[in-house]
Amino acid sequence: MDDRLTRQQQYLVPGIGLYYKEPLTLVSGEGRHVRDDKGRSYLDFFGGILTVSVGHCHPAVTRAITQQASTLVHTSTLYLTEPMIDLAEYLAGITPGKLSQSFFTTSGTEANETAIVMAQLATGREDIVALRHSYSGRSQVTMGLTGQGPWKLGGSGMALPIRHTHNPYCYRCPFGKTPDRCGLECAKDMDDFIRTSTSGHLAAFIAEPIQGVGGFITPPPAFFQEAVGIARKYGALFIDDEVQTGFGRTGKPFGIEHYGVEPDLMTFAKGMANGMPIGATIATPAVASHYTGPTISTFGGNPVVMQAALATLHVMEQERLTEHAAILGATLRNGLETLADTYPVMGDVRGMGLMQGIEIVGDGKVPAPELAEEILELTKERGLLLGLGGLYHNVLRIAPPLTVNDDEVEEALATLRDAMAALYQAHPALTSVTPTRLSYL
C-alpha cells in the first residue's frame, strides 16, 4: 500500500473518502489539467467539485493572492478592509433584484447556515422547507437541511423544524408522470405538504437551482415560479443556494436566472474564489436589517481570499466566461446525448451550461452505482477526471473549469466514448438494456 494512503488512514478520520481503487496523489495543476506524483497529466472535468472555476493556477488569481499575501494576510471584521468592501459592492452589482448586503464566511456550509439564521430573524419564525435530494453542508443545521440520508452523520441532523418536500426529479417522478404530462405535480404538492407537515408559518424555503450532490437534478422551467410562490404564501423567504450553480456555471450569471425568480437571500462558495476557502450570504436590505449581531467571522472577509475572489470574478467578466459556458455547454450536452443514444446505460442526461450529469442505470431505470464507479475508473485510466453523485451514487458529474476550450470538450467526449465502449465490451449483457431517456432539461 502507498505510504501516503497508509498515513491518510492512520491520521485522518475514515469518513474522508477517496475516489478510485488506487487513489490519485495530485501535485500540480495548470489550466484544465492536473498532474499526479508519477508525472501523469489528467484533463480535469470536475474542478475540485465545481470550485476551480477559471482553471488551475490562473495567473491573474495567483498574482492577486501573492500581492495581497505580501502586504496583509489577516485581520478580522472588527476593522475596515478595502478588499472585503470591494467584493461586497461587486456582488451587490451583479446579483439579481434587491440583494445588496453580504456576510462572508469560509464555506458553503457556513453561508447556508447564516442564511437560515437571517431568515429566522427577519421573519420571527423557525420552520424551514427544503427539497429532497438536496445538499446544504456538513454542520448540524445544514445536515438537517440536506435531503439525503447518507450525508446525515451523527443522527438526523434535525436541530431545527426542517421538512423536506418533493424535488423535481423528473427522471424518477414520484407521481409517475412524464415531463409532457407532469403539470409540475411536485410543486403543486408543496401546498398540501406545508399545510400538513409544517406549522404553516414558514421562515424560509431553501433550494439549489440545480441539485449538485443530489446528482445535477435539473428542475423544469416553471418549477421555481410555482414553488417559491407557494412558499411565500406561507410567509417564507426564498434562499437560493448558488454554492455550485453560481457565477456563470450554468450559462447565466446565476442558476436561478433560468427560472425568473428573485431570491430574498443567496448563498455562494466554491467557484467564487477559484479554490480559496470562501462562503458568502447576500440578502436584501429588508432581510439584512434584522441581522444586527453581535456576530463575527474570524476568517470570513480574509483579505487574501477577498482578493482571490475579486480576481476570479474579474477574469469571468473580462473573458466572458458566462457566455462561453453556455456555448461550450451546448457542445458538451449534444455530445453526451449522442453517446446516450448509443449506450442506453446512460439513462438520463441533464444539466445546464458546464454542469452536466449522466445517470447510469440498468434495465427498468434501476440505479447502477457499480457501473458508474467502473466508468469513473475507465475514464481515469484514459486521463479524464469526472465526479460522482446522487442519492444512489450513480450519476457522473461533469463540470470542467469555465475556461475549457473546444478541443478539450471534444477530447473529454472522445475519452468517455472510449470508456463506454470498453464498459460494454467487458459486460456484453449491457446490450440488452433498453433506452429510458426522457425529453426535458
Image: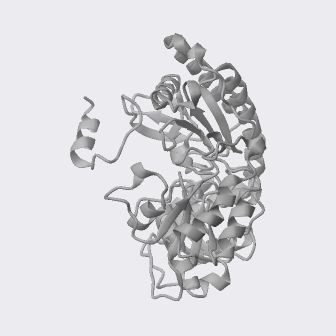
Q: Name the residue nearer the viewer: 383 or 339.
A: 339
Residue at coordinates 39% horizontally, 36% vertically from top-left? 25
The count of marks equals 0
Quadrant in the picture for the N terminus: top left
Residue at coordinates 59% horizontally, 14% vertically from top-left? 431
Q: Name the residue nearer the viewer: 33 or 178.
A: 178
Q: Which residue is outermost to the left?
A: 10
Would residue 273 be seen by someone viewing this image from the given angle? yes
- What is the x, y in percent for residue 282? 61, 73
- What is the x, y in percent for residue 175? 64, 47
Colour mapping used in the image: one colour
Q: In this rendering, would 36 be left or right of 86?
A: left
Quadrant in the picture for the C terminus: top right
- What is the x, y in percent for residue 127? 52, 74
Residue at coordinates 59% horizontally, 70% vertically from top-left? 195
Q: Quadrant of residue 351?
A: top right
Q: Is residue 132 above or below residue 363?
A: below
Q: In this rendering, would 14 be left or right of 299?
A: left
Q: Quadrant of residue 362?
A: top right
Q: Is residue 225 above or below residue 330?
A: below
Q: Is residue 247 above or below residue 88?
A: above
Q: Is residue 262 above or below residue 49?
A: below
Residue at coordinates 72% horizontally, 69% vertically from top-left? 229
Would residue 267 be seen by someone viewing this image from the given angle? no
Q: Quadrant of residue 263?
A: bottom right
- What is the x, y in percent for residue 163? 50, 65
